[in-house]
């Protein structure tokens, strides 16, 4: 259950599935919390699919991503 792809040297793209997002505000809340994790370069959350794409310097600790998503008020289902 992994979707990590090296997009350029020194960066990793991971797609996560998050349940409960239903609007732009939800996307912003999840993106904002995940953006605070050290090493994260960009985050794009899409409420309609529940997918959150994260580009980071190195693979992220799933527990840190789960904690960030929990802090935003949503549930991390796992990686896509």
Image (tube, helix red, strand yellow):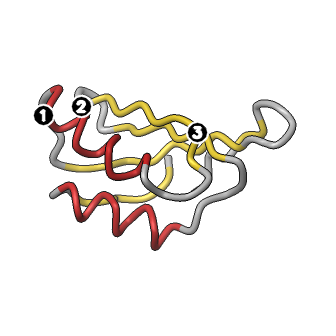
| Secondary structure category for the residue under label 3 | strand
Q: Is 47 positioned to the left or the right of 17 in the image?
A: left
- C-alpha separation, residue under disc 1 versus residue under disc 3: 24 Å
x and y, in percent, of residue 43 in the image:
46, 36
| Secondary structure category for the residue under label 2 | loop
Tally the numbered discs. Answer: 3
Q: Is 79 positioned to the left or the right of 76 in the image?
A: right
Residue that carries the numbered disc 2 in the rendered image = 47
x and y, in percent, of residue 19 in the image:
23, 50
Residue that carries the numbered disc 3 in the rendered image = 41
x and y, in percent, of residue 41 in the image:
58, 39
Earlier residue among tags 2 and 3: 3
Q: Which mark is residue 69?
A: none
Which residue of the protein is positioned furthest toward the bottom in this rendering? 63
Q: Which mark is residue 22?
A: 1
x and y, in percent, of residue 22 in the image:
12, 34
Query: Dot 3 surroundings within 10 Å: few (below 14), some, or many (20 or more)?
Result: some
CB atoms at circles 1 and 3 under 8 Å apart?
no
Relative vertical location of residue 73 with respect to residue 28 in this rendering, above or below? below
The answer to which image quadrant residue 78 occupies is bottom left
Relative vertical location of residue 31 with respect to residue 49 in this rendering, above or below? below
The answer to which image quadrant residue 25 occupies is top left
Q: Residue at x 87, y 37 (%)?
A: 9
CB atoms at circles 1 and 2 under 8 Å apart?
yes
- Please name whichever residue, 48 or 25, is drawn nearer the observer in this view of the structure: 25
Q: Residue at x 28, y 45 (%)?
A: 30
Relative vertical location of residue 20 with respect to residue 51 in this rendering, above or below? below
| Secondary structure category for the residue under label 1 | loop
Query: Dot 1 surroundings within 10 Å: few (below 14), some, or many (20 or more)?
Result: few
- C-alpha separation, residue under disc 2 versus residue under disc 3: 20 Å
């Amino acid at each position: 259950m992994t979707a990590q792809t090296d997009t350029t040297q020194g960066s990793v793209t991971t797609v996560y599935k998050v349940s409960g997002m239903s609007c732009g505000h939800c996307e912003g809340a999840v993106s904002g919390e995940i953006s605070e994790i050290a090493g994260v370069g960009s985050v794009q959350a899409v409420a309609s699919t529940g997918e959150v794409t994260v580009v980071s310097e190195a693979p992220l600790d799933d527990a840190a991503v789960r904690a960030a998503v929990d802090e935003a008020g949503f549930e991390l289902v796992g990686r896509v």
